Image: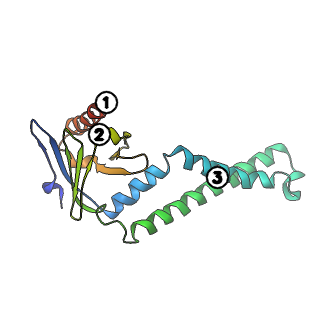
Amino acid sequence: MNASDISLVASQEHHSIKFSVSFFDLIKCRFWRLNHQPFLLGINLFFSTLIPLQHWNSPEVADHSTGFKLFVFLFTFTIMYILIILVNLVFQILLVFSGKNRGLVGAMELELRDDGLLEKTEVSESLHRWTGFHKIRSSKNYYFVYVTESNALYVPKKCFPSDQAAEEFEDQILKRIGKS
């Protein structure tokens, strides 16, 4: 599916958007979600802090000035945080390529209906009722439509013909879940 295949169809009853999600989109979205979940951020910060604190009183560092200790702490913290992010990224890439993503990658259509959000893919069709919705978030390039607390649909903003159409899509969801 290319950009010319993407369309936003609106009628009085519903709004529909067709788009395609690639493996690269899926990796980017999962990584964004990973870095915007407070619990996971807390775990990353905890482990990134734990290891540098263990070295604070080690013989190699204890005899030096507080400034040196702070430098070692910040350097080790930064290295640990980057390492944890890289491990998470590799894990997300492995999950994407594990083959368990049927329906997440490829052509997709979302239809905003009165009874819920209808998700159609090449392998499935699901109706997510508005009462079960949790939230909608956005990054620079994607909307994250949380149909449950931990399950989000990834909608590329590039699939909308205009910024106004993208904002209307978000407004329609917020209106239907009662958060506008």
Residue 67 image offset from top left, x and y in percent: 80, 44
Drawn side of residue 9 relative to residue 50, left or right: left
> What is the crowding at mark 3: few (fewer than 14 residues within 10 Å), some, or many (at least 20)?
some
The answer for how far apart the CA atoms under marks 1 and 3 are is 41 Å
Element type where label 1 sits in the image? loop
Residue that label 2 marks: 130
In the rendered image, residue 128, in percent from the top left (x then y), is placed at: 28, 47
In front of the other: label 1 or label 3? 1
Q: Amino acid at mark 1?
A: Gly
SS class, disc 3: helix
Q: Look at 60% across and 46% down and name the residue there.
A: 42
The dot on residue 13 is none
Q: Are marks 2 and 3 in contact (CB under 8 Å)?
A: no
Q: Quadrant of the C terminus?
A: top left
Task: Pick whichever of labels 2 and 1 is earlier in the sequence.
Answer: 2
- For disc 3, the marked residue is 78
Inspect the image, locate mark 2, and give the three-letter code of the amino acid beneath it. Answer: Trp
Mark pair 2, 3: CA separation? 42 Å
Tell me, yes or no, whether the two marked residues, 2 and 1, touch with CB atoms within 8 Å. Answer: yes
Foreground tag (2 vs 3): 2
Query: Which residue is located at x 74 percent, y 50 percent?
Result: 73
The residue that appears at 60% across and 60% down in the rendered structure is 83
Q: Earlier in the sequence, mark 2 or mark 3?
A: 3
Q: Which mark is residue 178?
A: 1
Sequence order check, earlier mark of 1 and 3 = 3
In the rendered image, the vertical position of residue 23 relative to residue 118, given as above or below: below
Distance Cα–Cα, label 2 vs label 1? 9 Å
Residue 40 is left or right of residue 51, and the answer is left
Task: Indicate whether 12 appears above or below 73.
Answer: above
Q: Secondary structure at mark 2?
A: helix
Q: Residue furthest top?
A: 180
Q: Position of residue 69 (x, y in %)?
A: 80, 48
